[in-house]
Image (tube, rainbow, N blue to C red):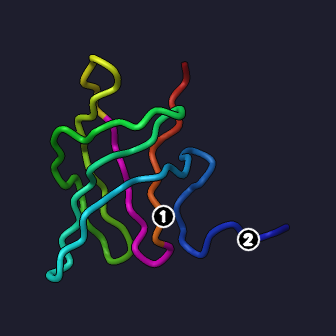
């Protein structure tokens, strides 16, 4: 069995997503855009849900077409990946 991740997060419940983010010299992270189902979605607002030694979780409001929807994005610092929960359609 191939190891997918070196962290202890459960990847079966999340999907990796491309995110454009701003990183400043003090270590602050600001998500700007996320690609969801092939659509580039602007992050309208966010707040930090939780911060741990190896990841930061963001509650975001993103613009998908004409709608604003809540999305949780998690940034894994050691792996430099962004994930979001898999939702049932």
| Residue 85 image position (x, y, % from top left) | 47, 41
Which residue matches tag 2?
Answer: 3
Whether 67 is among the magenta residues is no
| Quadrant where the image shows the N terminus | bottom right
Whether 77 is among the magenta residues is yes
Q: Which of marks 2 and 1 is in front?
A: 1
Which residue matches tag 1?
Answer: 81
Q: Which of marks 2 and 1 is nearer the N terminus?
A: 2
| Quadrant where the image shows the C terminus | top right
Residue 18 position (above or below residue 78): above
Residue 45 position (above or below residue 47): above
Q: Residue at x 46, y 71 (%)?
A: 80
Q: Which mark is residue 63?
A: none
| Main secondary structure along the magenta-highlighted residues | strand
Q: In this view, does 61 lie to the left or right of 20?
A: left
Q: Which residue is drawn at 54% across and 46% down?
A: 14
Q: Which residue is drawn at 55% across and 24% down?
A: 88
The residue closer to the viewer here, 65 or 70, is: 65
Instruction: Give the CA separation, mark 2 to mark 1.
Output: 16 Å
Residue 81 position (above or below residue 54): above
């Amino acid at each position: 069995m191939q190891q997918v991740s070196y962290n202890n997060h459960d990847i079966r419940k999340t999907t990796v997503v491309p995110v454009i983010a701003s990183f400043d010299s003090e270590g602050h992270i600001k998500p700007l855009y996320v690609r969801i189902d092939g659509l580039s979605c602007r992050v309208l607002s966010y707040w930090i849900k939780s911060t741990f030694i190896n990841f930061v979780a963001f509650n975001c409001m993103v613009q998908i077409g004409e709608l604003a929807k809540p999305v949780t994005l998690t940034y894994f610092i050691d792996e430099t990946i962004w994930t979001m929960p898999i939702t049932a359609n």
